[in-house]
Image (cartoon, helix red, strand yellow):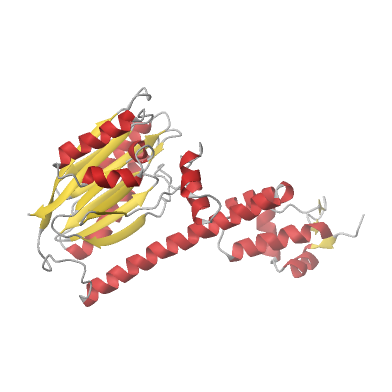
Amino acid sequence: MDALLTIGDFARATGLTPKALRRYDELGLLRPARVDPFSGYRYYAGEQVERARLVRWLRRIGMPLAEIGRVCALYETDVPGAARAIRAYWAGVETETAVRRDLAASLVDRMKGTTGMTTTPEGADLTFRAALLLDPGLVRPSQQDAGRAEGRLLAVADGYGPEGGAAATAAVAALAAVPGPARAGDLLHALEAGLRKANGAVAGRADSGTTLTAALLSGNRLALAHVGDSRAYLLRDGSLRRLTRDHTVVQALVDAGELSPAEAAARPDRVLLLKALDGADEPPEPELALHELRRGDRLLLCTDGLSAVVPDEELAPALTRGADPTATAGALLARARERGAPDNVACVVADAIDD
């Protein structure tokens, strides 16, 4: 057997500090080859250098330790799989960065007064004419989706686990209980505070949680907060645009170029979430965005019971037929039922109108 390296020599060979090596040992991420039973001194084998360097570089790109452990385990038996996992992680980072960049740009434009995105005068009040429809679908034994379409707040939630229905309902109720902002500039803060309250309302429900996608309107500005794989869409001048990105493993693989959108839609694991409200002490960071609405814009918020069976190219025609929100939501639910409605559905259709 080759001579073992002391922790100091191993640290110099790998670029990791002794403190980091001790931490990775405690976490089971990088165990030493031998620990002296009397002194507790750690020794490492030469073949561990490659794994240690991999850990170091993954930390350099900001990968969480739990994810690093999964990549390292894959690297031992499935090198292409490890590479795919790294690409998927980095695609998610780039997407999150793009979302933050768009948010920063919208905030800068608002402060400069140069958005040029709306024909509605600055400060003009819009409100919603909206409808919420819930449907258990044709397969699920119970309803675990929830929603809200009241005043200037729209929300949908998709619960999971044995108490998923209660989790979704509690999250939406907690969000709705947060006072609305007095000024348009407080929109994002109010909505983010609402999501924190919603996450707290989910706590204590064993192995259960929920997605949550919410929109809050003030004047002609719309704040959007999103966690999970429910969705928000904007229909403007006959063109439909999705405003949210699914926080799922499959979407991360699409972003990394490993799957096409068509392949992703057929994957049985497409429902595996990367983010959800589960009552953890540290809630997930939501996707936040600020948009300006025009009079006549139409919003659709829905859970994946609708979006998974009615593709985007079919949503636009259904939303542009001129029916009121209640009739439009009913038509969308009917389309989901025509395709077997394998999951619960929560669907909000809202039109931006003068207050």
From this viewpoint, which residue is outermost toward the left?
Answer: 355
From this viewpoint, which residue is outermost toward the top?
Answer: 141
Relative to 99, 291 lies left or right: left
Q: Position of residue 20 (x, y in %)?
A: 66, 62
Q: Position of residue 155 (x, y in %)?
A: 26, 45
Relative to 26, 10 lies left or right: right
Q: Position of residue 192 (x, y in %)?
A: 30, 55
From this viewpoint, which residue is outermost toward the right?
Answer: 1
Image quarter where the C terminus lies is bottom left
Q: Position of residue 290 (x, y in %)?
A: 27, 61
- Residue at the spot 35% in from the left edge and 66% down from the top edge: 102
Viewer-closest of 134 and 11: 134
- Residue at the spot 14% in from the left edge and 41% down from the top edge: 323
Image quarter where the N terminus lies is bottom right
- Residue at the spot 54% in from the left edge and 60% down from the top edge: 90
Viewer-closest of 272 and 116: 116
Residue 197 seen in this snapshot: no
Q: Quadrant of residue 289?
A: bottom left
Q: Quadrant of residue 308?
A: top left
Residue 43 seen in this snapshot: yes
